Amino acid sequence: MPLQTEFEDIVQCDVPMAEHTWFKLGGPVEYFAQPTSIEQLEALVQRCREEDVRLRLLGGGSNVLVRDEGLQGMVVQLAGDLFQKIETRPQRVVAGGGAKLGHVISTAVRAGWGGLETMVGIPGTIGGALHGNAGGRGGDIGQWTCQATVMTRAGEIHQRQRDDLAFGYRESSLDELVILEAQFELEEEDPEELTKRMQKLWIIKKANQPLAHQSAGCIFKNPRGMSAAMLIEQAGLKGARVGQVVVSERHANFMIAEQGATAKDVLQLIDQIHQAVAERLGVELEKEIEIW
């Protein structure tokens, strides 16, 4: 029985991935699913496993570039209230894997729980943020994470406690298929002071980065002790262009996709930057964005 027949309520066929990524680029995926319950997700994961259908999980789409030719297999995006819930408890915030990171930060700030506000302006979902240990100069999400509930590629659900978790620079041990829920243990602070701090950080970030509708997140990871943006600028690549994709004049670690851009343009510009920084400055940049 075809996947789209058994799961017609949640599965669509040949969905353009450009509709679901910040770059607004990329070809169609064979199957696109938005389950709204754990039972639906479990059944879908099990069926994909039985049929040997490759399954990828998409968060907010801010850290993914899909190739122009599109994808075989299934892309799953968590939808519905269950996966996007946000709750506050004494010194804790509990959030579903599909909840937007920005909403979780603002909820914590209003409740007077500090720590996450340093990540204001970082796009994406809680699941994606934890998978890649999102963060900035003020810290990362991993340092506040005390528990995570995950689903494996076999459809099994496990709870990971703090001692089971490991976080590094833009990486974590949470590499299971789905992060269903996470808990963050935070510090009690005055909500007004937290709000002021968050607003100040947001203003600074907004002034130094391109507008969200123009680009995805950072393209390269910062090498240890160095800034990828500074290296790209030192290599003379600020404003560099391939086709309709250009390196941002505001922040050299962002790319802006203009009208008519293709994923191929982005990939060629990534390769050009990688090669130039290696040749001119002797540094091998590592991609932060995922290429599908």
Image (cartoon, rainbow, N blue to C red):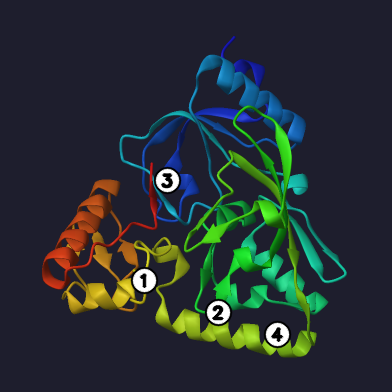
* Sequence order check, earlier mark of 2 and 4: 2
| Quarter of image, res 116 | bottom right
Disc 1: CA contacts within 10 A as few (<14), some (14-19) or many (>=20) = few
Residue 160 screen position, x and y as percent: 71, 48
What amino acid is found at the position of numbered circle 2 in the picture?
Answer: Gly
Residue 201 screen position, x and y as percent: 56, 84
Q: Is residue 124 visible?
A: no
* Residue positioned most to the top: 1
Residue 91 screen position, x and y as percent: 82, 71
* Sequence order check, earlier mark of 4 and 3: 3
Q: Is residue 240 visible?
A: yes
In space, the residues marked 1 and 4 are separated at their CA atoms by: 31 Å
* Sequence order check, earlier mark of 3 and 1: 3
* Sequence order check, earlier mark of 3 and 2: 3
* Sequence order check, earlier mark of 1 and 4: 4
What amino acid is found at the position of numbered circle 4 in the picture?
Answer: Thr
- Observer-side mark, 4 or 3, equals 4
Q: Residue at x 21, y 60 (%)?
A: 274
In space, the residues marked 4 and 3 are separated at their CA atoms by: 34 Å
Note whether 193 is above or below 8 in the view shown. below
- Observer-side mark, 1 or 2, equals 1
Q: Which mark is residue 18?
A: 3
Q: Which residue is mark 2?
A: 138
Under circle 2, the secondary element is: loop
